[in-house]
Structure formats: C-alpha cells, structure tokens
C-alpha cells in the first residue's frame, strides 16, 4: 500500500512540475520577438510516409511597431508522377507585440476553396470564415504554431475554417529533435480538444522546431525544420 501511495505521489509531483513549467514558459513568451528568434524566415519541409510532399514557409517583416507575417503552405501528393491531391494555404497577418490585430487566410483543398478574415477592434476580434461570423473577446492566437505564446492558451483560431476551438496543450516532456541545424532539445506539447492529434515542439528559446499531426484519414504528416533559427548576426541587424 505504501508503495502505491509513493508511486501516486511521485506521479502527482511530476505532473505538477510539467504544469508549472508550461505556465512559466507561457508568461515568458509574451514578449517573444520572431525576428530575433528566427530571423526573417522559418522554413519546414513536409513529409508523408517517408516522402517529401510539400513546404511550409513563414516570413516576418517589421513595419514600425507592426509585425507583418506571411505564410505559404503547399502540398502535392503524386502517384506515378500525377498529382493525386493538392493543398494550398496562404495567410497574411499583422501583430502588435504578441497581439494578433488582423489575419486574412485563403485555402484551396484539392479544388475546394475557403477563407478566413479576422480584425481586432479594441478588446474584441471579429472573425469571418466558413463557420460564420463571430465575435471573440480577449487574447486569441491563430493555429499557425510559430508563436510560442500559444502555450497555456485554452482556445485558438482555426485559420482553415474560422472556428474558435477550445484546446489544451499538455507538456509531454523534452525530446531531441533533428533539424537542419543539428539536433536540438525541445519541449513536446500535445494538443487536445477541438484541435487534436497534433504534436508541436519548441526549443528553449521558444522557437518552433517540429510539428506532427494526423489527417482526417489517419495518415501522419510531419514537419522537419530546414530553417528555424536566426543565422549569426541576422537577428542583431533586424532589431
């Protein structure tokens, strides 16, 4: 009986430590500056069943106090040299510090097109997407992953549909992640709730270094970091 109590106590301590780490990191990343962390660009290759099927590129540009973020995500699945499936996503967003002020996203899912538009007005953000028009108060991070401030949030803006989903990000633990810069130690988080079957990894500086998720058909898609760290000297020149 004592052994069982000790095991339960040890498990509780471990869980509390993980939760405390998540809270501390979420507060720390409120002042996250992607130009300092990444430089002007984040680039991933996208893989399925051991084959590269696409790319995901995020570009950052400062315009006064405003941060402009452009995202381009392209996937092509080919069978015998013929494109059997394609997916295209592009978005343009503006940020004031860690606050999303606007985003326009367009999606082409194998010929089916959609889009999401959102604008902040004071403490409220108005979202228009395939899920209809809605108003959301307070902080709202999009499901684009590059900003570690999403850690600890309980909802995200789905930039594919315009839905605002309730989520939980659970810290699984630390793992070594293979990147184009070599192996890096990163914290692995698992999404659950309206956004689920998604694992995302952030290094000790809050940089997004890996992503893995399941498609609706149950296939595993993985992002591998090709450029997710600012080159020496770039960050200083961009501040």
Image (tube, grey):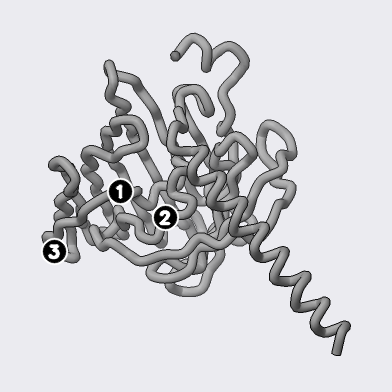
Mark 1 or 3, nearer chain start: 3
The residue sitting at 59% across, 19% down in the picture is 231
Q: On residue 132, which mark appears?
A: 3
Which is more N-terminal, label 2 or label 3? 3
Residue 96 in picture, x, y percent from top left: 29, 31
Instruction: Name the residue: 64% across, 58% down.
Output: 18
Q: Quadrant of residue 160?
A: bottom left
- Residue 65, relative to residue 175: is it above or below? above
For this view, does 64 lie left or right of residue 236?
A: left
Task: Find residue 126 and report its horizontal and vertical position in percent.
Answer: 14, 51
One can see residue 47 in this view: no
**Alpha carbon distance from label 3 to label 2:** 23 Å
x, y percent for residue 125: 18, 48
Q: Which residue is mark 2?
A: 153
Q: Which residue is mark 1?
A: 139
Q: Secondary structure at mark 1?
A: loop
Q: Are marks 1 and 3 in contact (CB under 8 Å)?
A: no
Name the image quarter holding residue 203: top right
Residue projecting furthest to the bottom: 1
């Amino acid at each position: 009986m004592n052994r069982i109590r000790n095991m339960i106590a040890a498990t509780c301590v471990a869980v509390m430590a993980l939760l405390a780490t998540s809270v501390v990191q979420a507060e720390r990343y409120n002042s996250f500056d992607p130009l300092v962390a990444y430089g002007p660009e984040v680039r991933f290759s996208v893989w399925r069943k051991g084959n590269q099927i696409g790319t995901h590129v995020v570009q950052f540009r400062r315009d006064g106090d405003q941060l402009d973020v452009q995202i381009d995500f392209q996937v092509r699945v080919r069978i015998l040299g013929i494109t059997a499936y394609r997916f295209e996503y592009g978005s343009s967003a503006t940020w004031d510090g860690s606050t999303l002020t606007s985003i326009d996203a367009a999606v082409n899912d194998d010929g089916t097109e959609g889009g999401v538009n959102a604008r902040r007005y004071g403490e409220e953000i108005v979202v228009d997407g395939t899920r209809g028009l809605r108003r959301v108060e307070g902080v709202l991070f999009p499901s684009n992953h590059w900003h570690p401030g999403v850690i600890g949030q309980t909802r995200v803006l789905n930039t594919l549909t315009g839905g605002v989903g309730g989520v939980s990000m659970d810290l699984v633990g630390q793992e070594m992640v293979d990147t184009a810069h070599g192996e890096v130690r990163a914290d692995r988080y698992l999404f659950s709730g309206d956004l689920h079957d998604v694992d995302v990894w952030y290094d000790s500086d809050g940089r997004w270094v890996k992503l893995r998720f399941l498609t609706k058909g149950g296939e595993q898609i993985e992002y591998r970091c090709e450029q997710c760290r600012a080159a020496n000297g770039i960050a200083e020149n961009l501040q």
